[in-house]
Image (cartoon, rainbow, N blue to C red):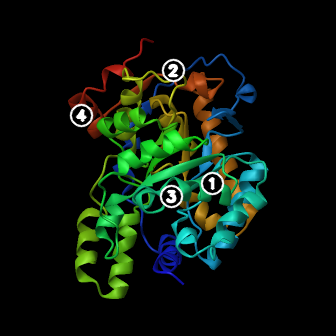
Amino acid sequence: MTQTTRRKIEQLRICAEQEVEAEEATSCFADVRLVHVALPEIDKEEIELKTEFLGFSLNYPIMIASMTGGHPETKRINAVLAEAAETLSVGIGVGSQRAALEGVGSQEDSFRVVRDTAPNAFVYANLGAPQLKEFGVAGVERVIEMVDADAVAIHLNFLQEAIQHEGDVDAGGCLAAIKEVCEAVKKPVIAKETGAGISYGVAKKLHEAGVAAIDVGGWGGTSLAAAEIYRAKAEGDELSEHLGRLFGWDWGIPTVESILECCAALSAPAPVPVSTPVPVVATGGIRTGLDAAKSIALGASLCSAALPFLKPAMKSVEEVVKKITEMGEELKVAMFLTGCRTTAELKGAEVVLTGKARETAEQRGFLRSLLRSP
């Protein structure tokens, strides 16, 4: 069993059993208010949640975010999540497939079970940016083939890597590697942060590199860097534990702010015009359908979450389906009360930004794009 494989089960157990979420206010969703429409003039029963993403039609604008895989004990969790995704026709991502590449195929079934269980769902593969230099385009094609993926996420997790004792902190050349992958593979490439958010500048670089979508993975939800605190403590690694406490809870771009930064970057003129818009996925502290509604009103195309589905997945498929359905109903109520029949209309809903999110948007110059006439 490789070090990566052991780490995968340790991280899953920590996320399920320990406190790994940032404070609720960190994501800044409390700073976002949708303007109530007293005369919505629509029938709530006619509200449509179907959403197009990278050429696929999803029944909900809510995906099951990359979560796990890479250890025999993770196979059941992935199977449960995949069955829920197939049942509801929502998207799902697998966890980092690095373990399968390093383990010479020994962990592949913990990932492959997702496609086996969800033959019709939108599934995306997943590999870290540092691994692109190690495994190259061939490695990316292998992880895509492993789960018969419809897209591949290249995740950016340098905050977590910087805290891990065994972390890969050589970030040199990653942008060039991402560009090479975008040019070489036939599947859409999603650039995905894992809890520290993506800024305007980085989003522009990723856009120019050719990514098909950007998942903001903002600060405010599950902190994998904070999860490293528990691993370090168990291993007696005082320095990594200290770094985790210093940065794990208090570093990154809040999800709300990252949505604004990425949407602004993607709407700015690019050196080479793209034929299709690059959608933004809001991840990081999405806990309710109201959070999803706020994210879409700010400019995201859809949302994803991991931790809200992990504990239900440890119980049954039905519990995961129940949670997603509940979030969908919450989203419908928010859409009804803003007079929006579709998620496309929700993007035009009036938004009031307050508090720290407003202060940052003003300082960064992104507030004007939110000012919509009644």
Mark 2 vs 3, N-terminal side: 3
How would you rate the neighbour count of disc 3 (Cα within 10 Å): few for under 14, some for 14-19, many for 20 or more? many
Give the amino acid at mark 4. Answer: Glu
| Contact, mark 1 vs mark 2 (Cβ under 8 Å) | no
Residue located at (48% from left, 56% from top)? 136
Provide the residue designation for mark 1: 144
Mark 1 vs 2, N-terminal side: 1
Provide the residue designation for mark 3: 127
Residue located at (66% from left, 47% from top)? 91
Provide the residue designation for mark 4: 359
The secondary element bearing badge 1 is classed as: helix
Give the amino acid at mark 1. Answer: Ile
Mark 4 or 3: in front is 3
- How many angstroms separate mark 4 from mark 3 (CA)? 35 Å
Q: Quadrant of residue 267?
A: top left
- How many angstroms separate mark 2 from mark 4 (CA)? 22 Å
